[in-house]
Image: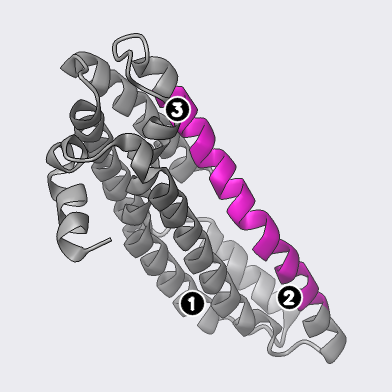
Amino acid sequence: MALYALRDLLVSPREFFESRRPESLTFPALGAIVLVAVITAGGLWAVMQLAVVDLPPEGRRAFRRVFGTVLVVLPFVMLVSWAILAGVVYLLVRGDATEATYSGTFGVVGLAALLEIPATIIGFVRAYMLFASVSFSDPETAQRQLEAAASGEDPLVLLVWIGVTLWKGYVWREGLLGAYDLPSDRATLAAGVAVGFSLLMVLFG
């Protein structure tokens, strides 16, 4: 996707979707979600390398086997989550937009996954900094340090994710208005429900 199109998607989503058939964006949306999954897997790998560096060879081999499973499962789980989210939005808009299709709605909803890339990177940078300060050579000390860190959410990462989620809500609302001839209150409701689900994942996921 050209940079100007990406700018329009994130800043002027209504105009972006008005000039495109939503169904033509299904595969770009899939690509956006898979890209986030790849970045997430890369971040997990980088962070966990700090934890396994002191492990014996058999421990590192076990980690590689587990991580191989994660590489398979993670994109699938993310795709299913986005598919369900798109399905909820589609059910909320189809009564007011006869031309709405599930694949088109998935295109509108899924492209907003691109907004998660900077939040994902920031989250893993913060996690890497945390893990770099933990002494994994002493398991008991490492456990205490990690439990102390886990007892309080990183406020910066949490604020970034909340901001990104609200921005996704803006893209969804304006995108639905641009893609379909919807009443504004219906687009707001659909986007609001999607934001609510997303915030629950951020806060409790």
Query: Which SS class for mark 1?
Result: helix
Q: Position of residue 118 (x, y in %)?
A: 33, 64
Q: Is residue 154 left or right of residue 204?
A: left
Q: Which residues are magenta?
A: 62-89
Q: Is residue 169 above or below residue 43?
A: above
Q: Quadrant of the C terminus?
A: top right
Residue under pointer 3: 102
Q: Nearer the viewer, residue 80 or 133?
A: 80
Name which of mark 3 and mark 2 comes first in the sequence.
Answer: 3
Q: Amino acid at mark 2?
A: Glu
Instruction: Give the quarter of the image for residue 179.
Output: top left
Residue under pointer 2: 140
Q: CA distance from mark 2 to mark 1?
A: 20 Å
Specify the color scheme. one colour
Name which of mark 3 and mark 1 comes first in the sequence.
Answer: 3
Q: Amino acid at mark 1?
A: Tyr
Q: Position of residue 52 (x, y in %)?
A: 70, 83
Name which of mark 2 and mark 1 comes first in the sequence.
Answer: 1
Q: Nearer the viewer, mark 3 or mark 2?
A: 3
Question: Residue lying furthest right in this view?
Answer: 58
Query: Which residue appears at 26% of the width and 48% of the height?
Result: 163
Residue under pointer 1: 128
Q: Nearer the viewer, residue 31 or 24?
A: 24
Q: Is residue 74 above or below residue 180?
A: below
